[in-house]
Image (cartoon, rainbow, N blue to C red):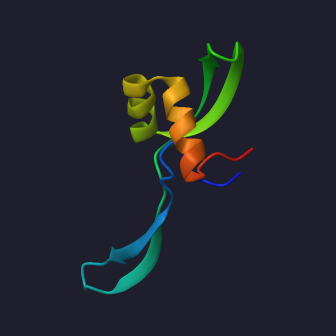
Amino acid sequence: MSKICQITGKKAMVGNNVAHSNKRTKRKFDANLFSKKFYWVEQDVWIKLNVSAAGLRTINKMGVDAALKRAAEKGYLYE
């Protein structure tokens, strides 16, 4: 399972660890993901999504149905 938000499309970023001597080594910044179950009223089913904290706020603001429609249009949904 990849570490990508199914609502916002957020994924891992690459950056540097910077030592006190200013030596730089590569590191990865993972998205803040949660595996959550949501009740989709329109389809009368429970669905399980990997969502970031920003994705949870989006679902709270727009609702599950509208957020899923927008994510499907942008191609963020996967099984």
For residue 32, side relative to residue 4 (left or right): left
Residue 48: image quadrant is top right
Nearer the observer, 30 or 51 = 51
Marks counted in the figure total 0
Residue 13, given in percent of the width and then of the height, sits at: 45, 66
Question: Which residue: 62% across, 13% down?
Answer: 41
Nearer the observer, 70 or 22 = 70
Residue 37: image quadrant is top right
Residue 5, given in percent of the width and then of the height, sits at: 54, 47
- Looking at this view, name the residue that lies furthest to the right: 79
Nearer the observer, 29 or 44 = 44
Relative vertical location of residue 57 with respect to residue 6 in this rendering, above or below: above
Quadrant in which the C terminus appears: top right
Relative vertical location of residue 26 with respect to residue 70 in this rendering, above or below: below
Relative vertical location of residue 66 with respect to residue 3 in this rendering, above or below: above
Residue 55, given in percent of the width and then of the height, sits at: 45, 38
Residue 47, given in percent of the width and then of the height, sits at: 68, 26
Relative vertical location of residue 4 with respect to residue 38 in this rendering, above or below: below
Question: Which residue: 45% across, 28% down?
Answer: 59
For residue 30, side relative to residue 45 (left or right): left
Question: Which residue: 70% across, 12% down?
Answer: 44
